[in-house]
Image: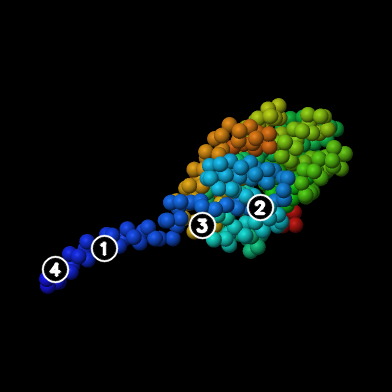
Amino acid sequence: MTTTPLNRRRRLLTFLPALALAAVASAPGAAAADDYPTRPIRLLVGYSAGGGVDGAARLLANQLSQQLGQPVVVENRAGAAGQIAADAVAKAAPDGYTLLLGESALMIARALLPAQSVDPLTAFTPVAGAFVSPLVIIAGNDFPARTPAELIQELKRNPGKLSYATSGVGTVHHLGFEMLKQETGTFVLHVPYRGAAQIVPDVISGQVPLGVVSVTAAVAQAKVGRVRALAVMSRDPVAGAESVRPLADALPGFDVAPRLFVLAPAGTPAPVAARLSAAVKIALDQPETAKAAEAQGTVRAFLDPGQLQQAMQAENRRWSQLVRERKLSPDGG
């Protein structure tokens, strides 16, 4: 049978759709997303074991392992305010097997050290928001204030005479208090520490009048009468610390708390990110997760990839503006 130009064209038109389908099926990430995951997943944390972010990571990893059918292994890469872990994940293969439990300090680091930090808005694929970790301002028992309004009065009454301790320069603890200073027109000296374990004893002894710590650290010490919990820095009262009033009572709209979220390397296929996001949501919805999160002083706060991207962009703008306006520097000034 003679093949005419018309017949050849008909055969080509018949073949092209099948070829297109084959190309889609073999595209990077397409086949992988269908059966993902097929091996263990690493969840990197930029802080040492035993801390608040590490605890949230292990809680989430345990639940994700059940939802995904593969082990999710927490790997601590402490140092440089989370930048070591962030850099490792940013450089990893974008296949969904290396993830980061990031937090708001990533956006602060970008504002303070733009040339030495990973850009969280371009280096990662947003996967899911997971938790918010409320912060509390504590004081020694001899400190005159007992409420958010009285705290602000004391700050205004003693310009340059008071200091506050945080777990380090560039943390939300640090910039949150700087925002408090900005909104109240007060001057309080920042004293960076390495964490609540060092802050609390010095607040108790009066070596530093004020400290910013996690809810769990604040409540545990306040219940036994060693410190006074003055104010929650997030907008709403926190479960387990209902008696501690929000700063928003005295400063309407004030709302500062570290957000914890899951990121994958930039270029991770959308179906893989969607699979992970759905698993995070189911994990957070489990009653045992709610109970464990409350015990750790965290609040479940799921965001899908689009919502997380918007939240990260908003935080980036917020902290960048504060750094510029307060003329903050990496040395704590």
Badge 3, how many Cα within 10 Å: few under 14, some, many 20+? many
Q: Which mark is residue 16?
A: 1
* Residues at marks 1 and 3 touching, judged by CB atoms closer than 8 Å: no
For the C terminus, the quadrant is: bottom right
Asked whether the viewer can see residue 198, the reply is: yes
Question: Which residue is denoted by mark 4 in the rendering?
Answer: 6
Tell me the SS state at disc 4.
Answer: helix
Q: CA distance from mark 1 to mark 3?
A: 29 Å
Where residue 55 sits in the image (x, y, percent)?
A: 68, 43
Q: Amino acid at mark 3?
A: Asp
What residue is drawn where x is 54% and y is 61%?
93
Q: Secondary structure at mark 2?
A: strand
Task: Tell whether label 2 touches label 4 (CB within 8 Å).
Answer: no
Relative image position of residue 290 (x, y in whole percent): 61, 33
In front here: 54 or 243?
A: 54
Residue appearing at x 75%, y 57% in the figure: 331
Other-residue count near label 2 (Cα within 10 Å), few / some / many at <14 / 14–19 / ≥20: many
Q: Which numbered disc covers residue 95?
A: 3
Q: Position of residue 314 (x, y in %)?
A: 55, 48
Any mark on residue 75, and which?
2
Residue 75, x across and y down, in percent: 66, 52
Question: CA gap, disc 1 to disc 2?
Answer: 46 Å
Q: Give whichever of 316, 268 is nearer the camera.
A: 268
* Left or right, residue 71 beside residue 212: left
Q: Amino acid at mark 4?
A: Leu
Apparent side of residue 18 relative to residue 39 in the rendered image (left or right): left
